[in-house]
Structure formats: structure tokens, C-alpha cells
Image (cartoon, rainbow, N blue to C red):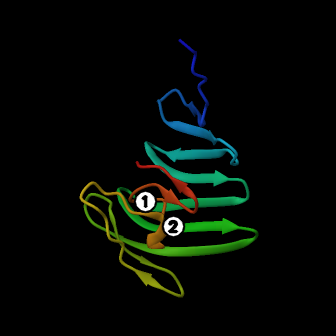
Amino acid sequence: MTGQRETVLCRYQYDPLDRVVSCAPLSQQSIQRFYRKNRLATEIQGQVQHSIFEHEAHLLAQQQLQAGRVDSALLATDRQRSVLHFVTASEHQQPVYCPYGHRSPESGLTSLLGSWVSMGNDEIQ
């Protein structure tokens, strides 16, 4: 019987509250995550930073900072915090989700919310 060699695809680090604060995908830059209370507030990967703005439990906006350029979007959500409308200065999107909430990266929505698709990361929340 031959031994199979395991390959590590991603390394995760957790904080004392058991939240993912860092992940290092194979052959990609490390991702750092910062939380406000128990909710994701900011995610940084290399020179790209995404931040979520909210008031109490209501999502308001998302901001992306990349190469000195800031892009902002207003969010309209339902009671479960699913993004229903995503409005930027140049476009208005209404995302479509499958029954379990996943949305493909090809849909064009660049929000951290809904299914953790954030400009190149494809993880399901």
C-alpha cells in the first residue's frame, strides 16, 4: 500500500472567539478579516480592502479600496441581511441566489455579503 501525500490548500487562523481572522490560500496573498462585534467589518487581501458599513443590524454600504481608488456601493437588504439591491455610481444590480444562498462569481456582484464572494475569493459563508 502506497502512502498518499496530502497538500495543504489553505491555512486558517482563528481568534479566541473562534472567528476566522486570517486565511492563506495556496499561491494567493493572505486574507485578513476584522470584525465588529460578531460580524465581518473589513477584509484585506494584499492591496485590496473591503469594508462593510452598518447601523445596528441594518447593512448600509460596502466600500472597496484598491490602488488608491475608492469604490462605494449602497446596499438594500431583507431581514435576513441578504443583499437584494447593490447600487454604485455607475450601476444598479439585483443579485440572484440559488435556494441555499450561493451566487456565482460570474454574476458580477462584488459584495462581501450574501455568499462571501469578494473580488476573487469564493467561499460560502
Q: Amino acid at mark 2?
A: Gln
Identity of the amino acid at label 1? Leu
Q: Residue beneath label 1, please?
A: 113
Residue found farthest to the right: 67
* Viewer-nearest of discs 1 and 2: 1
Residue drawn at x 48%, y 73% as measured from the top left: 108
- Label 2's element? strand
Q: CA distance from mark 1 to mark 2?
A: 9 Å
Callout 1 environment at 10 Å: few (<14), some (14 to 19), or many (20+)?
some
- Which quadrant would residue 86 be assigned to in this image? bottom left
Vertical order, 10 against 6 (above or below)? below
Question: Are dots 1 and 2 in contact, CB under 8 Å?
Answer: yes
The image quadrant that residue 2 belongs to is: top right
> Reading the chain from its start, which is encountered first: label 1 or label 2?
2
Q: Residue furthest bottom?
A: 90
Residue 95 % position (x, y): 36, 72
Residue 116 % position (x, y): 46, 54
Residue at 24% across / 58% down in the picture? Answer: 99
Point 57% across, 46% down: residue: 34
Secondary structure at numbered mark 1: loop
Q: Is residue 64 left or right of residue 59?
A: right
> What label sits on residue 62 in the rendered view?
2
Task: Give me the disc on residue 52.
Answer: none
